Image (cartoon, rainbow, N blue to C red):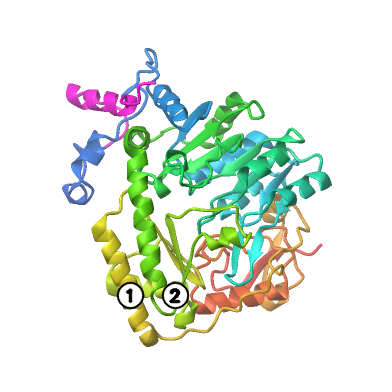
C-alpha cells in the first residue's frame, strides 16, 4: 500500500482549500465564532480543522470511504487484518472490545492489575470476571503481568470462559508473554484481547517488546496518544483471525462510541501512521539510545534505584519497554508522589507517573537533547534537595497477596444494588458497592462485589493521609466506604 498517502489529512486540506461554508455543527463554524481569547491559546487552526466527518470531509451519499482508507493503511502498517479508529480513548475501546467477546452473565478472564476503565466495563456489560492475578514483586512493590500458566489454570477452572483480557505493557513498562498467553487461549479456542494502551510504538522497532498482533493476539487496543504522536483520546482497535467478528466489533463500537467523532483525532492518527512507516525505525532508534543514556546517568545518583532489563532476568516479566524510565526513590526518604510534586513545583517538569515508591518518565520519538538534559538536571536537583522535602506519614504497604480480594458478588449487582455508606472500620468484612482507585496510578484496589479486608482499609487510609487522590469513591476522604446493604 502507498503509505505516503494520508486520506484524512488530504481531504481536510482540500476542504480548507475550497473554503466551504458549513450550516451545521460544529457551531463555532470553523472558528468564525470562536472567542479570540480562546483562539489565542488554542490556535485558530484547531477550529479550522474541527470538521464533521460526514457531510463535511466525506459526503454520506457519495462516500469515498476516507476514514476506511486510513484504517486500511493503519492495519497494513502494523500487520493487522483490520484496524478501526476510536476518538473516545482506549477507556472506551477496552469496553467495546470486552463487549465484543462476552455478554451479560458470561465469564471473561481479566488481569486484576487492570485500569479502572476495565472494571467499569465489567459493571456496564454485566460479565462475570474471572480474575487472573498479576505476578507481585515484593521488593519493588509492583505488579507485573500474569504468566501463561496462570491463564491456563484459570481456563481449566472455568472452561465456559469466553476469552481473556491481558494488560501489557503495564504503566511501568513490564510486559507479559503475550504469545504464551495467546497459545493458552487458542488451545481452548477463545480469543485473547490485549489492552496495549502503552504499546502503540511497539510495531515499529525490533528492539521493543513484542507487538500484540505479532504475538498472535486476536484483538489489540492501543492508545496512540500515550507513546505515539497523536492527540489525546486517539485509540485504535487492531484485529486478526476469526475469533472476534469485525462486524460485531463495529456494532459494539457504534453502541458505545460517539456519533460525532473528532476529525482532529482521525487526522492525527492518519499522520502518525505515515510518520512511523516512513521514519519510525530511525526515530525510535534515537529514542532507545537516549533512554539508555538517561538510565545510565540516573544509576550513578545516590538514593535512586533505576529499573531496567533485570526484571526480565529475575523472571518477573517476559519483556521490558526500555523507553520507560522507572526510578524508585524510597531510599531518598520520600515517596514517588512527593518527588513528582517537588519536580513540578521547583523544576517545572511533569513526570509520566508516580506512586508511593517511584516516579517514571516516558521517552518517545519526540524527545531531544534539550529534554534529555532537563530531565537529568531536574532529577539531580531532586536528589540534592531530598532532605529538605517535608516527610509525610508512610503508606502502609500491604503484603503480597493481601490485595487479592474475594469476589463475593458480581460487580454489576453490587454497583447497582441497594447500598449504604458506613464508617471505614465498619466496612471490614462487608461487600464493596463502589470502585476505589487511588491515583496514581488508577488501578482499583477495591472493585464492586469484592469483600473488604482490614489490610485494604489500612492501606487505603494510610495512602490517603500520604496524598493519594481517590476520585471515584463516594467519599473521597475514605472516612466512610460504600458497601452493599444488608438484607
- Where in the figure is residue 472, as x and y percent of width and height? 55, 61
For the point 67% across and 44% down, the residue is 181
The image shows residue 246, relative to residue 455, as above or below, that is: above
**Residue 376 figure quarter:** bottom left
Which circle's residue, 2 or 1, is located before the other in the chain? Answer: 2
| Label 2, label 1: how far apart the Cα atoms are | 10 Å
Q: Which residues are magenta?
A: 1-27
> What residue does disc 2 label?
304
Residue 231 seen anywhere in this rendered image of the structure: no
Element type at mark 2: loop
Q: Closer to the camera, 157 or 446? A: 157
- Where in the figure is residue 315, as x and y percent of width and height? 63, 59
> What residue does disc 1 label?
380
- 248 displayed left or right of 384: right
- 419 displayed left or right of 64: right
- 387 displayed left or right of 136: left
Q: Closer to the camera, 290 or 108? A: 290
Identity of the residue furthest to the top in this view: 62
Answer whether residue 5 is magenta in the image.
yes
The image shows residue 144, relative to residue 193, as above or below, that is: below
Amino acid at each position: 500500500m502507498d503509505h505516503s498517502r494520508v486520506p484524512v489529512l488530504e481531504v481536510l486540506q482540500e476542504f480548507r482549500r475550497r473554503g466551504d461554508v458549513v450550516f451545521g455543527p460544529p457551531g463555532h463554524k470553523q472558528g468564525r465564532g470562536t472567542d479570540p481569547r480562546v483562539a489565542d491559546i488554542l490556535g485558530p487552526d484547531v477550529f479550522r480543522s474541527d470538521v464533521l466527518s460526514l457531510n463535511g470531509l466525506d459526503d454520506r451519499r457519495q462516500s469515498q470511504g476516507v476514514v476506511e482508507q486510513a484504517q486500511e493503511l493503519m492495519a497494513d502498517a502494523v500487520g493487522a487484518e483490520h484496524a478501526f479508529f476510536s476518538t473516545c480513548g482506549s477507556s472506551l475501546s477496552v469496553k467495546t472490545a470486552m463487549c465484543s467477546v462476552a455478554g451479560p452473565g458470561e465469564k471473561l478472564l481479566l488481569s486484576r492489575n487492570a485500569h479502572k476503565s476495565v472494571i467499569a466495563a465489567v459493571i456496564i456489560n454485566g460479565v462475570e470476571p474471572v480474575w487472573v492475578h498479576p505476578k507481585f514483586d515484593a521488593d519493588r512493590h509492583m505488579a507485573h503481568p500474569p504468566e501463561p500458566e496462570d491463564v491456563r489454570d484459570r481456563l481449566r477452572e472455568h472452561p465456559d470462559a469466553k476469552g481473556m483480557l491481558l494488560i501489557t505493557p503495564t504503566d511501568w513498562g513490564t510486559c507479559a508473554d503475550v504469545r504464551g498467553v495467546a497459545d493458552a487461549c487458542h488451545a481452548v479456542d477463545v480469543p485473547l484481547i490485549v489492552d496495549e494502551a502503552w504499546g502503540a510504538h511497539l510495531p515499529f522497532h525490533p528492539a521493543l517488546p513484542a507487538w500484540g498482533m505479532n504475538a498472535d493476539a486476536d484483538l489489540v487496543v492501543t492508545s496512540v496518544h500515550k507513546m505515539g504522536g497523536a492527540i489525546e483520546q486517539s485509540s485504535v482497535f487492531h484485529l486478526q483471525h476469526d475469533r472476534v467478528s469485525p462486524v460485531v466489533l463495529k456494532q459494539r463500537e457504534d453502541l458505545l462510541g460517539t456519533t460525532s467523532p473528532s476529525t482532529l483525532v482521525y487526522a492525527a492518527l492518519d499522520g502518525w501512521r505515515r510518520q512511523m512507516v516512513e521514519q519510525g525505525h530511525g526515530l525510535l532508534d534515537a529514542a532507545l539510545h537516549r533512554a539508555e543514556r538517561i538510565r545510565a546517568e540516573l544509576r550513578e545518583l545516590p538514593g535512586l534505584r533505576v529499573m531496567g532489563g533485570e526484571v526480565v532476568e529475575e523472571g518477573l516479566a517476559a519483556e521490558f519497554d526500555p523507553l520507560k524510565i522507572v526510578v524508585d526513590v524510597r531510599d531518598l526518604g520520600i515517596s514517588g508522589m512527593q518527588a513528582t510534586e517537588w519536580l513540578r513545583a521547583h523544576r517545572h517538569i511533569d513526570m509520566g507517573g508516580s506512586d508511593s515508591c517511584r516516579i517514571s518518565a516516558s521517552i518517545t520519538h519526540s524527545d531531544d537533547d534539550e529534554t534529555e538534559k532537563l530531565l537529568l538536571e531536574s532529577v539531580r536537583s531532586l536528589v540534592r534537595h531530598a532532605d529538605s522535602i517535608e516527610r509525610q506519614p508512610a503508606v502502609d504497604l500491604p503484603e503480597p497477596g493481601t490485595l487479592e480480594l474475594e469476589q463475593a458478588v458480581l460487580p454489576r449487582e453490587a454497583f447497582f444494588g441497594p447500598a449504604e455508606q458506613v464508617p471505614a472500620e465498619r466496612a471490614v468484612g462487608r461487600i464493596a458497592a463502589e470502585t476505589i482507585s487511588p491515583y496514581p496510578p488508577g488501578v482499583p484496589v477495591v472493585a464492586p462485589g469484592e469483600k473488604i479486608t482490614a489490610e485494604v482499609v489500612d492501606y487505603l487510609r494510610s495512602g490517603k493521609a500520604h496524598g493519594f487522590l481517590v476520585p471515584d469513591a463516594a467519599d473521597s476522604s475514605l472516612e466512610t466506604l460504600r458497601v452493599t446493604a444488608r438484607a
